[in-house]
Image (cartoon, grey):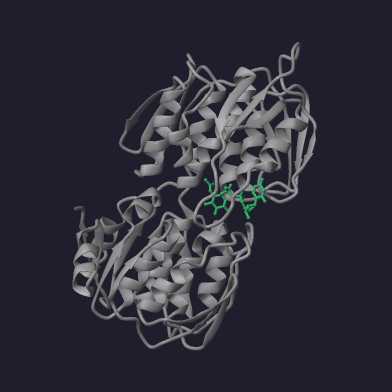
Amino acid sequence: MTVAAASSQEILKPHLSIDGSSRLSGVLRVSGAKNSALVLMTASLLTEETVEISNIPNLTDIAGMKAILESLGVEVTRRGDRISLTAANLSSSQPPYELVNSLRASFFSIGPLLGRLGYARVPLPGGCRIGARPVVEHIRGLKSLGAIVNVDQGLVTASLPGGMRRLKGTEIVLDCPSVGATETILMATVLAEGKSTIENAAKEPEVQDLANLLNLMGAKISGAGNSTITIEGVERLHGCRDYSVIPDRIEAGTFLMAAAITRSTLKVKPVVPEHLSSVLQKLRDCGCDLNIDDDGITITPGDLRAVDVTTQPFPGFPTDLQAPFMSLMAIAKGTSVISEKIYENRMQHVAELQRMGASIRLEGSTAIVEGVPSLCGAPVTGSDLRASAAMVLAGLSAQGNTKVCGLKHLDRGYDDIEAKLLGVGARIERYSN
Ligand code: UD1
């Protein structure tokens, strides 16, 4: 294929066209947290009554979760950012492979299905581009609660032994603080008999959000947000009205980095600053001034300096912001060392940033980034959700035009990103064909 033919094919794919290096100004509004909303929707399986949740982002992943819950017999109604879920008559305990495969969080439904029905059969979610993503911790936790769990031909079947009516509370010690395992086990233990503890639990804000919703539904959970969570099992949960999802800390972090990379003063809101403390510290370290008020965060970037980052579980620097932060470091003064410690294959954005003129050397899961004065526009492809966001940021700062392909990833996790960026003065346009 000639170079000309290749580039015209590239342009025919759905893409965002970004004319970079314009200054942005105004307010960027943050939607509800994708990773919270997905798991809160799953929690509706735990009760026959209606669960109403607001601040649900408009994302393809949310549409996917809606389809999965509907396949199980949940009645789901969505109006604007509100969703109403009623799992009065569950018709299935087996979400279909095609849906689970494209949405990892749907595997977490095994916890509430088992807790509520005493039986669940959920396809293994499989790996993804960023790494292997096992679910052994989820399965080990369910087994400790007394469930019989078998993995056969890609299906995980979990059931209660004969004569057992409820799971039995116990102490569960996670080998690693997996977010999904903590959430799966939390949803299984709320209806278990007696007390459970989860040691080495994930402390992510999305785990706290889930515990808050479950407590509103009648669960007795304490300690979410710490590494030990205690759950007193209850006989049943009830519905709830108008639980609001926390703001998306990853979207907020991406927007703060969009301000920094375009050297623009922007307000980002709403934000819970404690959910982003390690990110805010890194932004300050690299020369940004942050003004935090009740309403959000106003960021005013100075001369950008290189800083090192290592991804860690919360409250450390989130792996989901590693790629966007690398775009920023690509134009900062000096050398930064960015180490990915959560996923083994989350450096695919490096090659794309190099195509835009970034100077990056990759050593395993560590990137050594030598800042350059500016990036140049190019056709690029985001290989996963956060890599796509990194490409958008790079495009906003680059000289000339950038075409960002791979929108199916971006649309999984960023609610109407081009409209939001257009609203603050970015020159960005979507081509859907
Ligand atoms: C969640 C987030 C994802 C984020 C990740 C880490 C959702 C829907 N997704 O994913 O955006 O990047 O947290 O913050 O909430 N691990 C094991 N064994 C297990 C489970 C996990 O070794 O049984 C390892 C994984 O390979 C990975 C690390 O633990 O290295 C973190 O994974 P985990 O916290 O489980 O991520 P998810 O819950 O899938």
Residue 362 coordinates in the image, percent (x, y):
54, 77
Indicate left or right for 253 with 26 as reference. right
Say which quarter of the image contains residue 423: bottom left
Residue 17 coordinates in the image, percent (x, y):
23, 65
Is residue 260 visible in the rendered image? The answer is no
Residue 179 coordinates in the image, percent (x, y):
62, 47
Q: Residue furthest right?
A: 171
Camera-nearest residue between 233 and 394: 394
Camera-nearest residue between 54 and 427: 427
> If the image is split into quadrants, where does the N terminus sit?
bottom left
Indicate left or right for 236 with 232 as reference. left
Q: Say above or below: 292 vs 265.
A: above
Q: Residue furthest top?
A: 163
Residue 248 coordinates in the image, percent (x, y):
46, 52
Q: How many marks?
A: 0
Q: Say above or below: 208 vs 93.
A: below
Q: Say above or below: 353 vs 343.
A: below
* Residue at x-position 67% and y-position 35%: 185
Camera-nearest residue between 247 and 42: 42
* Residue at x-position 52% and y-position 76%: 284
* Residue at x-position 59% and y-position 62%: 344
Indicate left or right for 314 with 86 as reference. right
Is residue 87 visible in the rendered image? The answer is yes
